[in-house]
Image: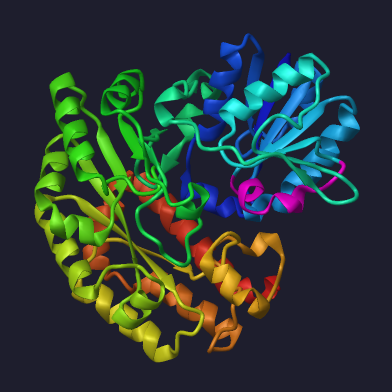
Amino acid sequence: MNVLLIQPPSQTPLMDQVYLFEPLALEYLGAGLKQDGHSVRLLDARLDPDVDGCLREFKPDVVGLTAFTSHLNIVKRLAEQIRGRLPQAFLVIGGHHATVCPEDFNDSAFDLVVIGEGVMAMKEILRQLAQNGPFSGIDGLGIPDPQGMRFTRPRPYTPLDELPFPDRALTAPYRAHYFSEWFKPLASIRTSLGCTARCTFCALWGITEGKYLRRDPLAVVEELKGIAEENIFFCDDESMCDTLRMGKLAELIRTAGIRKKYFLYARADTIVKHPELFARWAEIGLSQVFVGMEDFSNERLAKMKKGVSTDQQTEAARILRELGVMMYASFMVDPDYSREDFQALTRYIRDLKLSHATFTVMTPLPGTELHAARRQELLSNKPELYDMLHALLPTRLPLPEFYDQMAKLYAGAVPMRRSLPTLLRYGLHGLLLRFRLFGSFLKRLRAAHLDY
C-alpha cells in the first residue's frame, strides 16, 4: 500500500523560526511500515505545505496524521481536505493528543485513532486493512462512532529495543532545515521514554503508566553511527535519570570515536548529585543541557511536585558553568504572578549568572494532574491556545499587563553582557536575523491577550 505520513503545519509558525525538530515519531512509523513492504512517503507540512500536490502525485491508500493539542483543529481541517481529495483513503490519527484525549477525534473524517505507541499498531492496522478484517482485535485503538467512540484493549508500550531505527531517509528533502536555535543542522534521537518524576504539569510520565523505558546503549551507539548531522538532540522526556546507563553510553560513544555536539534534558537534582557524569559527557561533546527550572520559589516548586529546590538549581547552574556546558534554563510562569513575582524572577535569573533562559506559561495540558484539578477554571478551550505561551488559568494581573511582563522577561531577564556570547553563535548575519525575529516575537507576545 501507499502510505502518506503527515507532520501538520504549526499553530504558531513564528516558533518554527526558533526551533524545528525532525518528526521522529513519523520516521519510526515509516520504518516499521517499510519493513512490511509498504511504500511510504513523509510530508513535513511545516516546510512543504502542498498537501494537495502530494495527494495528487502519490495517491496514498492510507494517510497517517499526528497532533499535539494545539494541532487539534489543524488536523481536523487537514482530514477534511484529504477526504475531499481522496474520499477512499483510510485516515489514521495518532500522537500525543490522540493518546491523552482520543475522544476529541470521534469524527467521521477519521477511520481510526491510535492511542499510545504507534509503530506496531500501524503495522497491524495495515495487515487487517489488506484482509478487510475487523480492527476490534488490535490493542490501543479508538474507533470513531456516532454513538460514542469505541475502544479496544489498551496497548502496552513496546520495548524500545524491539522498534526499528527511525528511517531518516524519509525526511531527506528537509533535513538541512531542522534546527534548534544555533544547533543547525540538527538530528534527533530517542534513548528512553517516560520519566521518574511526577510533576503535576506534565503528562509524559502518565502516558507510560509511570514506567521509565530504556534503550540498550549499544543500540543507541549503532544508530548514532548512521546519523550524518554533527548536532544531536536527545529528545527523551528526561535523558539522565538512569545515571549508570548514561555513563555506559558516554563510554561507548567515546570508544566508538563518535564526535558530535549533544543537547539533552536533565533535572537540576541529577546534575547536583552526579557532576562527574556531566563532566564525562562534556568531554565527548555535551554542549547544552535543557533544565526545567520552572520557578524561583521552593513553595511553588513543592506544589507542582517538581522534587527540586532552589539551592539545587543554583548548584546545578554553577556545575554546568564550570564544565563549559550551557544551561538552557526554562522557567514556567505562574498565571498568578504579581509584578513583584516577575521582578523577583528576573533577580533570581541574574543571581544564577545564566547566559540563556526561556519562559513558558504554566499550562494545564490535557492528561496532567494540573488539568484534572483546575479544568473548571480554564479561560478558554481553544486548542490553539495550548502552546505554552498563553495563560489558560486566571491571571492575577490584567491579561495585557501579564503578557507585557512576559515580554520583559524575554527582553531583559538575562543581561546582554551574559547573553551576547551565546547569541554570537548564530554568526553576524544570523544574529541580525535573530534580532528581527526577536522583535516580531515580543510584538506577538504583547498582543496575545487579543487571541481569546
Residue 380 is one of the magenta-drawn residues: no
Where is 448 relative to 249, above or below? below
Residue in front for this viewpoint, 270 or 406: 270
Depth check: give the residue in front, 85 or 392.
Answer: 392
Residue at left offset 39%, top offset 35% = 190
- Could you say where residue 448 lies in the image, as x and y percent from the top left? 61, 71
Whether 94 is drawn above or below 314: the answer is above
Left or right placement of residue 113 versus residue 163 in this view? right
Quadrant that contains the C terminus: bottom right
Image point 40% across, 77% down: which residue?
A: 303
Q: Quadrant of the N terminus?
A: top right
Q: Specify start and end residues of the magenta stretch as a single range.
A: 96-108
Left or right of residue 279: residue 122? right
* Residue 215, visible in the rendered structure: yes
Q: Position of residue 129 (x, y in %)?
A: 78, 20
Q: Residue at x 54, y 85 (%)?
A: 401
Image coords of residue 219 (percent x, y): 32, 23
Q: Residue 277: image x %, image y %?
A: 14, 45
Q: Residue at x 33, y 82 (%)?
A: 299
Vertical order, 290 against 403 (above or below): above
Is the magenta region chiefly helix, strand or loop? helix
Residue 391 visible: no
Outermost residue on the top side: it is 37
Q: Is residue 118 left or right of residue 347?
A: right
* Above or below 280: residue 395: below
Please say whether residue 100 is one of the residues in the magenta stretch.
yes
